[in-house]
Image (cartoon, rainbow, N blue to C red):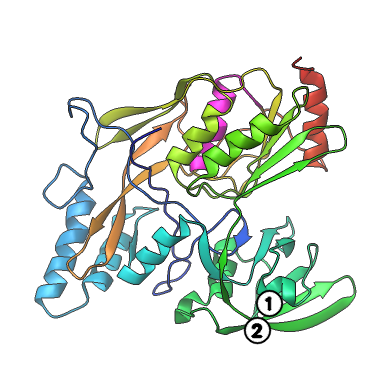
């Protein structure tokens, strides 16, 4: 699919912290950026430009830009003025980033991040458990394993914290900590408790992982929709055994480039509507490419960490009757942001609209309701569902 990308930006976990990017429930970098795909009616096929103070954008866009301009004229910080204006506006997903943060944001789309290489999730009791350790990362070199429990970061307890805040601590966002800086983790493994001091490194993510279960079912896990993810998923689908079902694991996926989510939808749909969205009152639509695998049994796994572009994909597969959705209600982030450059070079990302599923459901604030509860073992539940869906051959 051509076109520009839907913004699904992260939020800062604390004022003044560097950019917090959430890859799934990944304790690394991640999130979503780009600009809007498609063009509004009557645009003659032109792409929708980023809104400025003089365009027909919501009122708070002009207020943010004007606050930044006035601050610059008064010799004050435009970025701080813009942050205050965003805070007053009530724009839940509005954010202001420095030039460096925004550059880091864009680099994350290429799968680059500064961190220690831990994938983790927040359990029901609030504990943060390590779910995967990246090969060759500082965490792997220190012997940290999947199943270990993360108790603290630099002496600050993480139990009960949102994953976004844990990400910020691990990355050293408050201090703009670069690669090479130290971070001390408090860990538990069974009855053993210990601390480990690691040095952050510049790492590359692998947002798509594929594994084959004993019964031939293929599990495709997508951590985030960074560049190239859609093509990787299509390759994985083509490489799966012809008679097997697929589990598309979107748990903890915090979103990403919507063009990549649409390309992923194209792997399972034969064209047709994926989502609609509005930008300042203009209605636009996103469509899958024809030629996807429409016969293979498919289950999508979701949870409360499934956000934004991942919810868009889930809603499309569910509304189109292409997948059975198993899990818990998704996060409910269905708003559209666009960037505006401020006088000092910082960037304000402000909400301009919302998207809906093919069936017309609003995602923002509601999330996607799964078809089935996951039970105690979500993957096993998905395998049972695939058995009931039957053999595609």
User: Who's the residue at 73% across and 71% down the image?
Assistant: 140
Q: Is residue 237 shown in magenta? A: no
Q: Is residue 175 visible?
A: yes
Start-end of magenta stretch: 309-323
Q: Residues within 10 Å of mark 1 (few under 14, many from 20)?
A: some
- Which residue carries the number 1 mark? 152
Q: How many marks?
A: 2
The relative height of residue 14 versus residue 290 in the rendered view (above or below) is below
Q: Main secondary structure of the magenta part?
A: helix
Q: Quadrant of the N terminus?
A: top left
Q: Is residue 30 left or right of residue 192?
A: left
User: Who's the residue at 18% across and 67% down the image?
Assistant: 68
The CA span between labels 2 and 1 is 6 Å
The relative height of residue 111 versus residue 209 in the rendered view (above or below) is below
- Which residue carries the number 2 mark? 155
Q: Is residue 98 visible?
A: no
Q: Is residue 102 left or right of residue 327?
A: left
Camera-side residue of 140 and 274: 140
Q: Is residue 315 shown in magenta? A: yes
Q: Quadrant of residue 90?
A: bottom left
């Amino acid at each position: 699919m051509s076109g520009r990308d839907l913004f699904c930006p992260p939020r800062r976990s604390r004022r003044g912290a560097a950019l917090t990017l959430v890859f799934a429930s990944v304790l690394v970098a991640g999130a979503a950026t780009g600009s809007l795909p498609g063009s509004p009616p009557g645009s003659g096929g032109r792409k929708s430009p980023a809104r400025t103070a003089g365009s027909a954008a919501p009122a708070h866009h002009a207020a943010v830009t004007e606050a930044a301009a006035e601050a610059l004229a008064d010799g004050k910080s435009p970025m701080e003025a813009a942050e205050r204006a965003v805070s007053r506006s009530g724009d839940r997903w509005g954010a202001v980033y420095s030039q460096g943060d925004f550059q880091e944001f864009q680099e994350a789309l290429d799968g680059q991040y500064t961190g220690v290489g831990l994938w983790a999730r927040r359990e029901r009791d609030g504990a943060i458990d390590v779910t995967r350790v990246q090969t060759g990362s500082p965490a792997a070199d220190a012997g940290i394993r999947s199943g270990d429990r993360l108790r603290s970061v630099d002496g600050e307890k993480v139990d009960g914290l949102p994953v976004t805040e844990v990400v910020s601590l691990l990355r050293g966002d408050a201090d703009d900590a670069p690669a090479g800086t130290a971070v001390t983790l408090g860990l538990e493994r069974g009855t053993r408790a210990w601390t480990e001091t690691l040095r952050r490194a510049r790492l590359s993510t692998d947002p798509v992982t594929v594994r084959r279960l004993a019964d031939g079912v293929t599990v495709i896990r997508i951590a985030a929709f960074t560049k190239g993810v859609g093509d990787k998923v299509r390759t994985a689908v083509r490489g799966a055994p012809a008679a097997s079902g697929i589990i598309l694991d979107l748990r903890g996926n915090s979103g990403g480039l919507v063009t990549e989510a649409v390309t992923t939808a194209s792997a399972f749909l034969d064209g047709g509507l994926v989502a609609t969205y509005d930008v300042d009152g203009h209605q636009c639509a996103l469509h899958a490419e024809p030629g996807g695998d429409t016969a293979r049994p498919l289950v999508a796994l979701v949870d409360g960490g499934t956000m934004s572009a991942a919810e868009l994909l889930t809603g499309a597969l569910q509304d189109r009757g292409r997948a059975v959705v198993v899990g818990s209600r998704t996060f409910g982030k269905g708003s559209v942001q666009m960037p505006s450059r401020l006088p000092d070079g910082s960037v304000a990302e402000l909400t301009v609209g919302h998207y809906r599923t093919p069936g017309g459901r609003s995602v923002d604030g509601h999330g996607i309701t799964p078809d089935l509860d996951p039970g105690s073992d979500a993957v096993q539940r998905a395998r049972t569902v695939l058995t009931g869906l039957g053999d595609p051959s």
